[in-house]
């Protein structure tokens, strides 16, 4: 298009050799070596998008002279050498600003965007990540239009954010989403200002404070200090911190009327030892939040027993859909009797020895039990809806017991001690992925009827030869696109590759090698 010019990666030091059309509406100068704005770019009146990412601009004051103030919607100066944000007074149509990865120390220049209320831009996205900003300021007026329209205003993951002071409630009222990931936050105390003024309480939907140094969730209690001021928190992400207890969450139901409708709780990779505080979520049926997803992986939890409290009162049972408790110290599957709506259960990397306690989980679609101590596939007879199951890295010697899971699409049984492919496989007609690598299998068999099988992983087993391979895979001739047989004695045969290519016309990958000549367009 004549109105769009893309000069990405052109290694330009200036634009003297480039023809600049006066009708340009979009100009992309990413990854060049520009230090200043060309006067012809400054003179453009209809420019709507200007991208100067990955250049070496140290001074962007030239932006202030641009003739496109009434048209420019997207301005990107990411990854330059800026120490200051240019004054943007008069830019009335900006919806997106990107200043990440510079050396900016303050945000006050942004106040010029609201100097004239009538000229306030409909700014929707502001990025100032990876700079040296010490305080969130000068943004109070940016939410006038977007807050009215209920739009997401800002996502500012400031890497050097000084999150120690109390922010102004009028600023908080801008937010639907706050992201402060990979910063040096040690406390959530400033969140108490969210309810300092009930009239200013924001509709906070998502709070991301993962990968920080937070030790306690206690400040969250302030979210229900005043029921009228309680924001409707929907998602709370506090993974990869130093939190030891979920007890402060009990405050979420201190007043039923003030309980926020928490939908997703992510507290993975902390130091939590017990799920007991979750009992408070159903202390009052009327106050029970509709928790849908619970992520407590990579903690120090030893028992699932406290989860029984989630169903102490049937009327209060939350519609928990996904539960992730991987990489803990859990020894038994228990206390899930009332969580009949679970669709995803992740209990990998624990100390479980027996598949049990899943009698109520007929709705499960995914069951992940890899890296445990399970020696037998059992108690799955009612799971006819299950589509994915992982029992990798356990102590299985047989796949007997898998037949009842008739809807399986993906079956992962690698790194066990399985001796053979069981005849029960023939009942898994919907199977598309079968991974039985790193076992003791010596023969390909019992795959008849599996006409939808696309991926077959049999590497690192004990197959001496390819004898009978044509008969064993006759029902997969038109479906198999990937097969792994490497690290078997059979893979050393001179005609190994040619034989499989001749047998499987749809094959796109043999072992670790993609077959370019067979890639589908």
Image: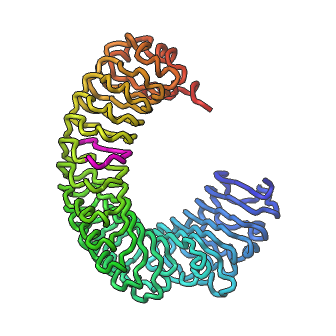
Task: Describe residue 519's horizontal placement relative to residue 483 as left or right.
Answer: right
Residue 360 belongs to the span the image colors magenta = yes
The image's colour scheme reads rainbow
Res 162 quadrant in image: bottom left
Q: Position of residue 76 (x, y in %)?
A: 61, 65
Residue at left 49%, top 82%?
171
Q: Position of residue 276 (x, y in %)?
A: 20, 65
Total marks in image:
0
Task: Describe residue 278's horizontal placement relative to residue 150 as left or right.
Answer: left
Does residue 180 appear in the picture of this structure? no
Does residue 357 appear in the picture of this structure? yes
- Residue 253 against residue 450 in the figure, above or below: below
- Residue 79 against residue 390 in the figure, above or below: below
Q: Position of residue 227 (x, y in %)?
A: 37, 83
Frontmost residue, 154 versus 197: 197
Residue at left 47%, top 22%?
476
Res 167 quadrant in image: bottom left
Residue 424 belongs to the span the image colors magenta = no
Task: Describe residue 87's horizontal placement relative to residue 204 as left or right.
Answer: right
Residue situated furthest right in the rendering? 22
Write down the region rendered in magenta: 358-372
- Residue 486 against residue 328 in the figure, above or below: above
Residue at left 61%, top 76%?
86
Task: Describe residue 126's horizontal placement relative to residue 68 as left or right.
Answer: left
**Chief SS of the magenta region:** loop
Quadrant including the C terminus: top right
Q: Position of residue 442 (x, y in %)?
A: 29, 18
Frontmost residue, 363 versus 480: 363
């Amino acid at each position: 298009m004549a109105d769009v010019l893309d000069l990405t990666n052109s290694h330009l030091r200036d634009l003297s050799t480039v023809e600049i059309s006066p009708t340009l509406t979009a100009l992309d100068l990413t990854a060049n070596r520009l230090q200043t704005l060309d006067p012809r770019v400054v003179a453009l009146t209809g420019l709507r998008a200007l991208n100067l990412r990955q250049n070496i601009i140290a001074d962007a004051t030239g932006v202030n002279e641009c003739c496109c103030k009434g048209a420019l919607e997207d301005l990107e100066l990411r990854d330059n050498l800026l120490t200051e944000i240019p004054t943007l007074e008069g830019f009335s149509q900006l919806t997106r600003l990107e200043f990440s990865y510079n050396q900016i120390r303050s945000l006050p220049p942004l106040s010029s965007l609201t100097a004239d209320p009538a000229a306030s831009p409909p700014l929707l996205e502001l990025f100032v990540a990876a700079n040296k900003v010490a305080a969130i300021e000068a943004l109070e007026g940016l939410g006038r239009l977007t807050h009215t329209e209920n739009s997401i205003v800002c996502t500012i993951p400031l890497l050097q954010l000084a999150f120690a002071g109390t922010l102004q409630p009028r600023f908080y009222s801008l937010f639907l989403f706050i992201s402060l990931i990979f910063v040096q936050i040690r406390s959530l105390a400033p969140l108490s200002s969210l309810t300092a003024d009930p009239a200013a309480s924001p509709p906070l939907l998502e709070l991301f404070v993962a990968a920080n140094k937070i030790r306690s969730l206690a400040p969250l209690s302030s979210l229900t200090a005043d029921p009228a001021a309680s924001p409707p928190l929907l998602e709370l992400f506090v993974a990869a911190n130093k939190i030891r207890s979920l007890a402060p969450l009990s405050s979420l139901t201190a007043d039923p009327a003030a309980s926020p409708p928490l939908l997703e709780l992510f507290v993975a990779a902390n130091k939590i030892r017990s799920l007991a505080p979750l009992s408070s979520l159903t202390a009052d049926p009327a106050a029970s939040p509709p928790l849908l997803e619970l992520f407590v992986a990579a903690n120090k939890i030893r028992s699932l027993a406290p989860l029984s409290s989630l169903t102490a009162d049937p009327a209060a049972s939350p519609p928990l859909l996904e539960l992730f408790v991987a990489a803990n110290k859990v020894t038994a599957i228990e206390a899930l009797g009332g969580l009949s709506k679970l669709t995803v259960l992740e209990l990998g990397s624990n100390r479980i020895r027996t598949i049990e306690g899943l009698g109520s989980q007929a709705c499960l679609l995914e069951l992940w039990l890899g890296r445990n101590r399970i020696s037998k596939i059992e108690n799955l007879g009612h799971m006819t809806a299950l589509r994915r199951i992982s029992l990798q890295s356990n102590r299985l010697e047989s796949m007997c017991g898998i037949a009842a899971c008739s809807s399986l699409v993906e079956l992962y049984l690698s790194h066990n001690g399985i001796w053979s492919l069981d005849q029960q496989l023939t009942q898994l007609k919907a199977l598309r992925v079968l991974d039985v690598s790193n076992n003791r299998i010596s023969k390909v068999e019992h795959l008849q009827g599996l006409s939808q099988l696309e991926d077959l992983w049999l590497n690192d087993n004990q197959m001496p030869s390819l004898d009978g391979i044509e008969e064993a895979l006759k029902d997969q001739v038109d479906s198999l696109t990937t097969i792994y047989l490497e690290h078997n004695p059979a893979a050393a045969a001179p005609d190994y590759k040619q034989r499989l290519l001749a047998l499987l016309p749809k094959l796109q990958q043999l072992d670790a090698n993609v077959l370019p000549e067979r890639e589908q367009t």
